[in-house]
Image: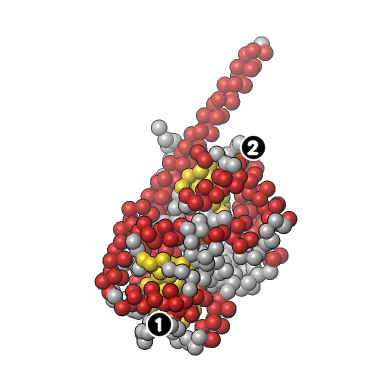
Amino acid sequence: MGTDTNGSTVAIVSQHFPPDSSGNASRVHDTAKHLTSEGWDVTVLAPPPAFPHGQFDRRWERRRTRDEDGVTVHNLWAWQPTAEDPGFVSRMAYYLLFPVHALLWLLVHHREVDVVITSSPPIFTGIAGLPFGLLGTTPWIVDVRDLWIDASIGLGFIAEGGIAERISRLYERRVLSTADRITVTTSVLGDRLADRYRLDREKIVHLPNGVDTDEFEPSESTSNPTIVYTGNVGHAQDLASCIRAISRLDHPAASLKIVGDGDIKGDLEGIAREEELNGVVEFTGLVPREEIPAILDEAMIGIAPLKSDESLEYAVPTKAYEYMAYELPVVATGIGEIESLIEASGGGFHVENDPDAIAEAFQSLLENEETRAELGANGREHMIERYDRGVVARHLSSTLEDVIEHADRSVVTTRLSNRLDEVRET
């Protein structure tokens, strides 16, 4: 029998939450909202909005509290980079000050919290939960969405085998081995973590990113020949190849809309100028989250262009789920899980990281309405059946119930053991 969730409080510690614009921000928001529907009292701890960097003014309040969709959100002060591509010191201050502040909040309010979730990336959010895991006072779930260390090495941010990697590995090992449960987005991610850190596979739970299929539901409006990308404009995305692919199309009305911001936006704008694509490639910058559905509804193709790198083979971008929910055929690049999703769903084309191959996929879809309709329908059906965020949240709710129930049994066992020791001594 599961634990009664009425009155039970879950605290979610996340580096990103709306109005931050990222796949993880929207996922944490939707997860928290659906958990309230399952009967949980949900509190989210997040820093002031600062991502993509350079899009927000700094805030200096120690805490700003608001209610959003029945969720209590505490924005706790942390360093907020204002440069588009922050330097190392600014990034580390952003990553480290927030979880320390979240830990202080949890220490003060720990009697009000029944279970803690820390969401990664970045890996440092685990700082807020580690003391509770070590002491065994509050059940703790580590939500892992990314092989953050591997990605940092693959993208050249830290040196393989260097002191930064060694310290990060030791820390991550401690966090994952201490947590009561580890939730992962893909089976590849879970296997990687279990093998690297010799983890108990029984405490690893598969919870995919998913999408709110009610919010992301297509209308009957006519789409434009627009190819759309939504999300972080960062180093892991091969948007450069997509821009070059546009210059190879034989379609006078086709355009590429890049919705979002990030570290490499300026570089991509330079490529668009080099390819003489002014007016064809549009960079909208950051837009409010609530505008994304309308943007997708007007588009014809969605792109999920991951770089072809082994460090990213576990990744499935949230945008891919959103495109499919909107019946947009997906053109994806990269290796591993993203390729598996395209194949299993029948919702798009997976191609090599090559402008000519990408252009060929674009051209085929733009010219064939029947193919677009078939792939789009396949994708939405797959999302409803397997990746709706309400379904995912119910699975998470069961996991939360399980760790609380297990913690309660452990407390009872400990008390009985202590009582028996007292009886023996007398």
Can residue 79 be seen? Answer: no
Q: Residue 296, image x and y in percent? A: 38, 71
- The residue lying at 35 percent from left, 68 percent from top is 329
Q: Residue lying at the far right in this picture: please name it.
A: 163
**Quarter assignment of residue 197:** top right
- The residue lying at 64 percent from left, 37 percent from top is 135
Q: Residue lying at the far top in this picture: please name it.
A: 426
Q: Which residue is at the front of the view, 212 or 40?
A: 212
Q: Residue 184, image x and y in percent? A: 50, 50
**Circle 1 is placed at which residue position?**
249
Distance of label 2 from label 1 (alpha carbons)? 60 Å
Answer whether labels 2 and 1 touch (C-beta < 8 Å).
no
Mark 2 / mark 1, whichever is N-terminal: 2
Helix, strand or loop status at disc 2:
helix
Amino acid type, mark 1 = Leu
Assess disc 2: are there few (<14), some (14-19) or many (≥20) residues with their C-alpha within 10 Å of its C-alpha. Answer: few
Above/below status of 278 relative to 121: below
Which quarter of the rendered picture does the C terminus lie within?
top right
Q: Which residue is at the front of the view, 371 or 26?
A: 371
- The residue lying at 44 percent from left, 36 percent from top is 3
Judged by depth in the image, the label closer to the viewer, 2 or 1, is: 1
Q: Position of 236 compared to 342: left or right?
A: right
Q: Position of 92 compared to 249: left or right?
A: right
Above/below status of 239 relative to 98: below
What label does residue 135 carry, if any?
A: 2
Above/below status of 269 relative to 416: below
Q: Which residue is at the front of the view, 159 or 222?
A: 159
Amino acid type, mark 2 = Leu
- The residue lying at 46 percent from left, 39 percent from top is 401
Assess disc 1: are there few (<14), some (14-19) or many (≥20) residues with their C-alpha within 10 Å of its C-alpha. Answer: some
Which quarter of the rendered picture does the N terminus lie within?
top left
Q: How is the image coloured?
A: secondary structure
